[in-house]
Every structure is written in C-alpha cells, then in structure tokens.
C-alpha cells in the first residue's frame, strides 16, 4: 500500500508513519513542519520506505502534485489545539475545514478513493448522552475546533456520496504517548520542571476526560481499515475509563516525587468550549475486535517517561518550535 | 430595530425585507446581486426605510464596514441550489461556510450580538427518523450544500459559546411563493411554457417533500425571534404535510389546463444527494404558537400564479440573471 500521510511529522502522524513502514508499506509524509518535527521522522526516513514532502495543505496545487499515485490518504494535518480558537476564530476554519476540503479535492483530481480522517470527540459538544455513541443526538458545537472538524467530516460524507470516495472517520479522545508535545501532561510536566512547588491548573480539577495511548489509537485505525467496508465508516476511539484532572496530577506528581501546591483557575471548565465530561462509547470499534492495551494511568506514565527522556521536546530550540504553548489541558490532542 | 439582511435581494430575503419595513424597522440589504434582483426591492426602497449596499459576503472588510451600527443580522446570502455541488465542490464551502464565517467575524468586530441563519433540512441527510426533529441522531451529509450549511450552524454555535452571540438557526424545507425563482415549480413551469406536451422530471416522481409558503416561513422566524431566548435557538420550519413530485405536477398541469407526457430521468433520487423523503418535525416552533396558514397545494398554486404574472422572472434579461437553471427539483430553496 502506498500511503500519503498529511501531518506525518506530528505526534500521531509520525507514530502512524513508523507503524505503516514497519508493516511494509511505502509512505509519503506531507507536512509543513509548523508544529511537527523533522526529528520525529528520522528513523522512518532511514528505512528507505518513507519520504518527506514539505508542503502546506492550503497549497492545493502542491498538495495535488504530491498526492498523485498513492492508494490511501491519512489526513492528520490540522490545527490540533482546541483552546486557542477564541484568539483567532478563522484559524480552525482555514487549517482544518478548508485544509480538509483541499485534501478531498486533491484526491478527486488524482483519483484517490480512500481517506482516513482524524476527527475528535469534541464534535459532540456537551452531549446529553455519556458515554457518547457515534449516533448521539445532533450535537451543538462548543468550540471552533469542534466546528471545524465537524465540517471536515461533513465534507468527507458529501464526497463519498458524490464521487464514491471511501471515508474512515475517527473521533478521538485525547491521545497520549511517545512524541506527545502538547496537552495537559506536557504542560504540567513543563511547569513542574521549572517550579516543582506549585502547579497552575485550568479549571477546578474535576473535569473528567478519557485518554488513549497513541499505539492503541493507531491499531484501532488499522483494524477499522481492514474490517470496515461502508462508504463512510465512523468510529469513536477511546478507552472506556476516564480520569479527572486531579487524579492525573496525582499520578504525575507521585512519579516525579513532588507535592506542589495546586492553583486552580476558572470554574468547571478550563477554557471556553472545554467539555467537563468526555467519555466516548467505543462499542462500535470494539465489535471489530479492537481494544486498548494500555490503561489511562499507563498511558499518562508512559508519556511522562517519554518527556523525561526527551528534554528537547519539552524545550525545543526556537527553530524547532513555532507555536505558543500555555499551560492547561486540552480535551483533544492530535498534531 | 435596525436590521442587516445579507441576501436581501433574493427570494426569501426580499420578502423578509418587505415584512421588516412594514413592521416599522429600518433595513440595510447587503447583496452582491449575483442571484438576487434589484427589482425585488423596488417597493421596499421606495418606503425610505430600506437601503441597498451592493457587496459580497466574501469581502470581509466591506461587509464589516456595512454592518456597523445595526442591531441584528439576518444572514440569508448563500448558494441556495443543492443540485450543483457536484460540479464544483468548493463553491458551497466558499459561499456558504466561509461566507457565514465572515458574517460572524464582522459581527464580532462591530459588536453585533444577534444572528438569524437560514439553514436547511438537507443537513439531516437521509435521516432514519421521519418526520425529523431538531435533535435527530447525528446525521450524515449527502450533499455539499448540506455540509456547508451544517458548518455554518456549527460556527454560529462556537461564536455563541465564545463571544456570547445569540443565534437563531432555521432549518427550512423547500420554500415557495412570490419571487420564487428556482426550484421545481419554476423549472416545470418554464419547461411547460416552451413545450406544453412533455415534461422532463429528475427522479421517478415519487420523491416526497415538504414545502412551506414564504410568508409562513417569515412569520416563523419573527415568532421565534420574539419568543425564544436561548443562546442558540434551532427550529425546523416546514409544514406537517408532504407531497410527492407527481402530485405537484398534477396540480400544476390542472391549473395550466395541459396534460404533458412525463419523462422521468434517474431513479429514486433526482440527483446526487437528493433525499427521497423529507418531512421535518416542527413541533418545537409550533409550541411557540406558530403554524403555517397555507397548505402545500395553496403554496404551489400561489407560486405558479406569481410566475404566470411575472414572465420576466421566468425569462429574465441576461443582465438580470447570471446563474444556470436546469430543470428538476431541488429539495431546498432559499436565495
């Protein structure tokens, strides 16, 4: 299989690229390196099966040229941080909605028929049904990020109806693991490294979220690709457990052997659009035989070990990191 | 109330402008006249309460300048024909999704807090629940038009959450009545005027759709504006009845006194993305005291009378009409 991975230099993307190469597939990474790291791809590039094409999904001509002669697109390139929408409401629209439209248009032009899309549990907004299944009641959006991903899903469905494209849409909980470089474990660890005696927390610490280890996430995608055959296949991807922010902090502090003073900011929600309770009903993907191998606690601790062993990710040289990274906790994590 | 109406020179828009002016409100129409007609606004402009600002919603600077100092936005400007998405999949994205994003951004910049949005029953795709309520199961999109309007709704919800904007979202069935200038009655009448002995029909004639008279549609909007007070208020707007295409053809031919041979093209669906059965559950808006005054048959016949009395709408001079107009029947009608 010849795979085209947008955002392949990012957190989930580069893990996927490694897995695809290990499975014998050839991979083209298409990434603008705005939030991804070249370093994440070093091993993959060394296999000789992976090549990197530096480009932006907003450049439709370049994207179309690079995509030609592949079998499947894994579309992971996105603005992945749900918290900053309020600073620039049109950024998610551009990078996620228009970007996805461009990926689909490039597929149509080059005759590609299969797309995997990284969507998010954020599109359920504050669902009245928890755990939330894929066919939950028509949701209301609470974030620009969720709105932009919902629009991306809708475009895939319309392309499937109009042109026979086959879509695999995955609504992720927060993903954790090796190469994780934003989100709550990252932000907490970074703060504690600088100041081990206190920790600033967005929200009141009671927000309940589900997390999934990146390796389990990728296995879920591959299982669905192998077994699901509908024109549009939609799967939640998460664990059946959840933990609250305070519990996550306790695990992190135990591992680091510290007891910081906790300073909470805001109320039930950590930021505008934050959903205080996210658990997805994943019985649809489980019915295909998939289940996560790591618990949330194991995922968080493995993430922490990775950050401890890779200080360059926590404090990358300026040229390797362009994006602001405030403290707090996103309820979705992708790039 | 000082009202800003995008698409105010269009079918629904110009009827709304007349109604607002009659209700004592001042109105600014913002329209690029690409599918609207200056002639639809002649009476409104003569009242002295209405002014026309010729501009495109894709021009954010011009839009922002024009919107300043109004109390409410009625956002009706859109590409309104669901059938042509397949010819240019990015057209609906631009005119509907990015257009709506611009309207919201202009509101944020000028401090406007209330928006009425013309959405569509097409966003339910082929719902498993008919009549379809507002909280139907998470829908799958079947058209680029539906996808673009879903994205518009999602953006309004995100703006409401982030900036306290109040949104009124109306999911219309097909709207009919005076100034209707595309859609199935228009197309059938136009064909029969040229060739009364035969009629070309997209689909097999059994598609069941609900239709609403434009005056009833506008009253529904005004009732909701007066009585609904949530940050985001979503209402289906339609009749509880439906009719199939063949019945509609019978009513039209009876009025015209002709018996054309019917030539059907395609199967159950008239075009890609056509939904063969659309009826919306309108109990939410009915609970506010609204009900339609015209039946579907009355709405169709009144539309036909309008077209008979206004031949310039059916065959407008070239400078008054820029859009192609094939035969067939859209399941949504707005502009």
Image: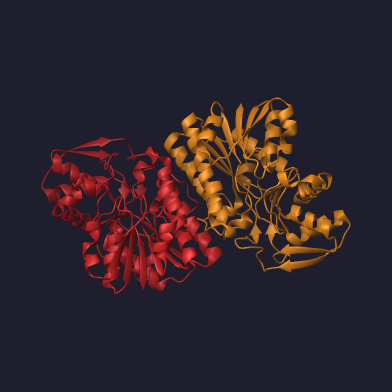
Chain colours: A red, B orange
Residue A266 in view (yes/no): yes
User: Where B45 sits versus B275, above or below?
Assistant: above
Query: Which of the 4 image quadrants contains residue A2?
Result: bottom left
User: Where B115 sits versus A296, above or below?
Assistant: above
Residue B162 position within the rendered picture, expressed as x and y whole percent measured from the top left: 42, 37
Please tell me which residue is depicted at 64% across the width and 35% down the height of the picture.
B222
Residue A145 position within the rendered picture, expressed as x and y whole percent measured from the top left: 40, 47
Residue B177 position within the rendered picture, expressed as x and y whole percent measured from the top left: 75, 45
Please tell me which residue is depicted at 30% across the width and 69% down the height of the picture.
A20
Describe residue B245's horizontal placement relative to residue B224 as left or right: right
Describe residue A238's horizontal placement relative to residue A317 as left or right: right
Query: Which of the 4 image quadrants contains residue B22?
Result: top right
Residue A125 in view (yes/no): no
Describe residue B195's horizontal placement relative to residue A132 as left or right: right
Please tell me which residue is depicted at 45% across the width and 48% down the height of the picture.
A147
User: Where B186 sits versus B5, above or below?
Assistant: below
Residue B276 position within the rendered picture, expressed as x and y whole percent measured from the top left: 65, 62
Residue B293 or B179: which is nearer the viewer?
A: B179
Residue A122 or B241: which is nearer the viewer?
A: A122
Number of numbered callouts drawn: 0
Residue placed furthest toward the left = A257
Q: In the rendered image, which quarter contains the N terminus of chain A?
A: bottom left
């Amino acid at each position: 299989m010849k795979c085209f991975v947008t955002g392949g230099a990012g957190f989930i993307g580069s893990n996927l690229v490694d897995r695809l190469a290990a499975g014998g597939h050839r991979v083209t990474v298409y990434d603008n390196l705005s939030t991804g790291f070249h370093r994440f791809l070093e091993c993959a590039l060394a296999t000789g099966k992976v090549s990197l094409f530096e480009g932006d999904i907003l450049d439709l001509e370049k994207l179309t040229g690079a995509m030609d002669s592949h079998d499947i697109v894994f579309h992971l390139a996105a603005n992945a941080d749900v918290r900053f929408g309020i600073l620039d409401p049109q950024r998610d629209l551009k990078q996620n909605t228009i970007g996805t439209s461009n990926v689909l248009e490039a597929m149509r032009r080059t005759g590609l028929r299969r797309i995997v899309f990284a969507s998010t549990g954020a599109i359920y907004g504050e669902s009245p049904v928890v755990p939330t299944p894929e066919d939950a009641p028509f949701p209301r959006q609470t974030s620009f990020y969720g709105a932009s991903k919902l629009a991306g899903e809708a475009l895939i469905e319309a392309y499937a109806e109009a042109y026979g494209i086959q879509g695999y849409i995955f609504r992720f909980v927060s993903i954790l693991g090796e190469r994780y470089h934003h989100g709550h474990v990252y932000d907490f660890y970074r703060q504690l490294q600088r100041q081990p005696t206190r920790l600033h927390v967005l929200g009141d610490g009671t927000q309940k979220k589900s997390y999934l280890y990146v390796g389990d996430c990728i296995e879920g995608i591959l299982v669905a690709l192998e077994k699901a055959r509908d024109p549009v296949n939609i799967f939640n991807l998460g664990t059946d457990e959840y933990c609250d922010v305070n519990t996550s902090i306790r695990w992190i502090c135990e591992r680091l052997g510290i007891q910081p003073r906790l300073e909470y900011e805001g109320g039930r929600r950590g930021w505008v659009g934050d959903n205080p309770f996210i658990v997805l009903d994943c019985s649809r993907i489980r019915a295909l035989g998939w289940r996560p191998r790591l618990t949330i606690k194991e995922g968080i601790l493995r993430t922490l070990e990775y950050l401890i062993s890779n200080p360059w990710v926590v404090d990358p040289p300026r040229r390797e990191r362009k994006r602001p990274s405030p403290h707090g906790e996103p309820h979705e994590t992708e790039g």
